[in-house]
Image (cartoon, grey):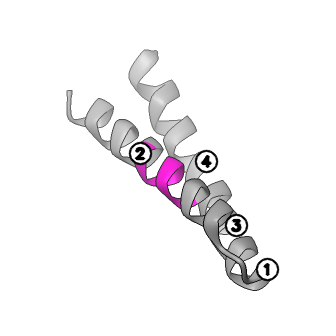
Amino acid sequence: MGNWMVVIVLLIIINLLVTWARLQKRKWLRYLLITIAVILVFPALIMGLKVIS
């Protein structure tokens, strides 16, 4: 049960980062937020696959 919560929280954080990045005017901040979101996708994917199997 706990792993599902971590995956859901990571996905919510990724969603918020991408939304915030789309609202930014500064290119460097936009790229930084998108990069952080992409990096967070991998742990969410790995934990999600662990929970499913």
Residue 40, position as x, y percentages in the image: 56, 55
Of the two numbered discs 4 and 3 on the same chain, state the one appearing first in sequence. 3
Point out the frontmost of discs 1 and 3.
1
Mark 2–mark 3 distance (CA, rounded to whole Å)? 16 Å
Image point 65% across, 73% down: which residue? 24
Find disc 3 in the rendering and name its residue.
35
Q: Badges 4 and 2: C-beta atoms under 8 Å apart?
A: no
Find disc 2 in the rendering and name its residue.
12
Of the two numbered discs 2 and 3 on the same chain, state the one appearing first in sequence. 2
State which region is magenta.
12-17
Of the two numbered discs 1 and 3 on the same chain, state the one appearing first in sequence. 1
Circle 3 Cα neighbour tier, 10 Å, few/some/many (<14 / 14–19 / ≥20): some
Q: Secondary structure at mark 1?
A: helix
Asked if residue 4 is among those painted magenta in the image, a careful observer would answer no
Q: Amino acid at mark 4?
A: Phe
Mark 4–mark 2 distance (CA, rounded to whole Å)? 14 Å
Numbered badge on residue 42: 4
Residue 36, position as x, y percentages in the image: 61, 67
Numbered badge on residue 27: 1
- Quarter of the figure with residue 20: bottom right
Q: Badges 1 and 2: C-beta atoms under 8 Å apart?
A: no
Mark 1–mark 3 distance (CA, rounded to whole Å)? 12 Å
Image point 48% across, 54% down: which residue? 16
